[in-house]
Amino acid sequence: MVLTEAQLAAVLGIAEDAVIIADSGQRIRFFNRGAEVVFGYPAAEVLGQPLEILLPPEARPSHHAHVERFGASGDSARRMGERGEISGRRKDGSVFPAEASICRLQTTGGALYTAILRDVTERRRQSELMRQAKEAAEAATQAKSLFLANMSHEIRTPLNAVIGMTSLLLDTPVTDEQRDFAQTIRSSGEALLTIINDILDYSKMELGKLELERHSFDLRRCIEESLDLLSPKAGEKNLNLAYIVEDGAPDMLLSDATRLRQILVNLVSNAVKFTHQGEVLVTVDATLEAQGKHLLHFVVKDTGIGIPQERLGALFQSFSQVDASTTRKYGGTGLGLAISKRLAEMMGGAMWVESQVGQGSAFHFTLLVEAAGRGERDYLHQGSPALTGKRILIVDDNTTNRRILVKHALAWGMLPSAAASAIEALDLVRHGHAFDIAILDMAMPEMDGMGLALEIRKYRDPKALPLVMLTSMGQRQKGVAWERASFAVQINKPIKPSQLYDALV
Ligand code: ADP
């Protein structure tokens, strides 16, 4: 079907966009209803006129250059199209921005130029308004973050004085009641300081002002320092706290130890907070990446209350807690995870979580680090003449601890036997297994470490079989039983390879 000129004009007449057709001499041949509205000319007034009356004077030279270029491209290209932003000029002389599609059509009667264009003044105005509103909102957020950063900084100074002075007060002679009051002031001050520090970090991150340091440090020591802060709390709740660094992870790292400790303290304190029985285990493994970098993969795994599947997504958002009652029951601001995740990302890694209600949670994070040569604790990876070939009895009801102790003993060339209960251990000793040394966990069901030691002493004296006691922090053993069992040494959980090594040697 071929449309007549009149039909075509009728069709184009309903378009809201301006449709203009000019001939090879650049004279206007068609001007639809939309063009009348956009340019303010009635069609009768412009038909036969030069096309350039629709352009502002300053746009005319470039328009001519364009047409020439179009023409020069030759007849072989029968049809050419172009789309872009141009300026239009209305009858009243006002200039407006327009979006135009222009094409050249070669016909038997010569070239035809068609322009379809749309006045985008209103759209421009809207997006300008949007841009201004966005800038204003960003400025307001910046101002808020700056205020938060300044304020938390200001609060920290007097708060440190409160905590410091309370500690000094506690060193002076005070009554038991006064000590109790002063200790409450100090622990509340410390809790407040944690919150203020979180807010300070968070606002610095919002402002993009949080900077990381880069220095070399000992990975194991960094983990141990983090766990030491939390082991009293874990001990109080009878939770087993442990860590394993798998072979292949570098000893010394080039990264930011303070920030790594901050992430670990955050995740482990959450794990201890939300676990009522069982254990909290930190593991680290490493893979070698490009350019000699190592991707460290940390997992903080607990056997706690867990997190419902549908809440996992929102967990890392700031100020988010799994449910509102959490604040009342466990305290906290909901900032810790948001900060930790961002820190991991700033250190070239990521953070994610797996969890099952009632089973526990595992928070994973990775960091991209450089190894910083060998550490001063090299001996921890090698057999030691003092320990090689020695038979060691390991008694702990906790599988993780047995695994850690056996792993270290093997690394030092020892011959370990592991028992999961006092009964099992006694069986081994009674049946004549000769051990050079034994490590006994204090807290075991049925018969504890002390009971087991007293039983062992019926068969072996302290010279024949030295005993090492493994306890939670704060459970220092004393008294008659301790004397009779004559333990050679006591070490605290979490098990630290260097401490264990020294004790065994
Ligand atoms: P805070 O602990 O200060 O409230 P976080 O960002 O560290 O803030 O944690 C946010 C919330 O995530 C916690 O309030 C808790 O509901 C949930 N959560 C974090 N860690 C655990 C965990 N190990 N087990 C169960 N719930 C957790």
Image (cartoon, rainbow, N blue to C red):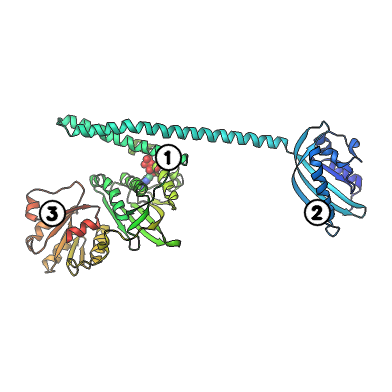
- On the image, numbered disc 2 is attached to which residue? 80
In the rendered structure, which disc, 2 or 1, sits on the residue that comes first in sequence? Answer: 2
Query: Splitting the image into 4 quarters, where does residue 387 fall?
Result: bottom left
Q: CA distance from mark 2 to mark 1?
A: 55 Å
Pick whichever, 45 or 188, lies toward us: 45
Pick whichever, 285 or 443, lies toward us: 285
Residue type indicated by callout 2: Met
Point out which mark residue 450 bears.
Answer: 3
Q: On the picture, is 118 further left or further right than 298? A: right
In the rendered structure, which disc, 3 or 1, sits on the residue that comes first in sequence? Answer: 1
Asked which secondary structure carries label 2, the reply is strand
In the rendered image, residue 365, in percent from the top left (x then y), is placed at: 40, 52
Q: On the picture, is 413 further left or further right than 148? A: left
Q: Nearer the viewer, mark 3 or mark 1?
A: 1
The quadrant in which the N terminus is found is: bottom right
In the rendered image, residue 323, in percent from the top left (x then y), is placed at: 40, 40
Q: CA distance from mark 3 to mark 1?
A: 48 Å
Point out which mark residue 202 bears.
Answer: 1
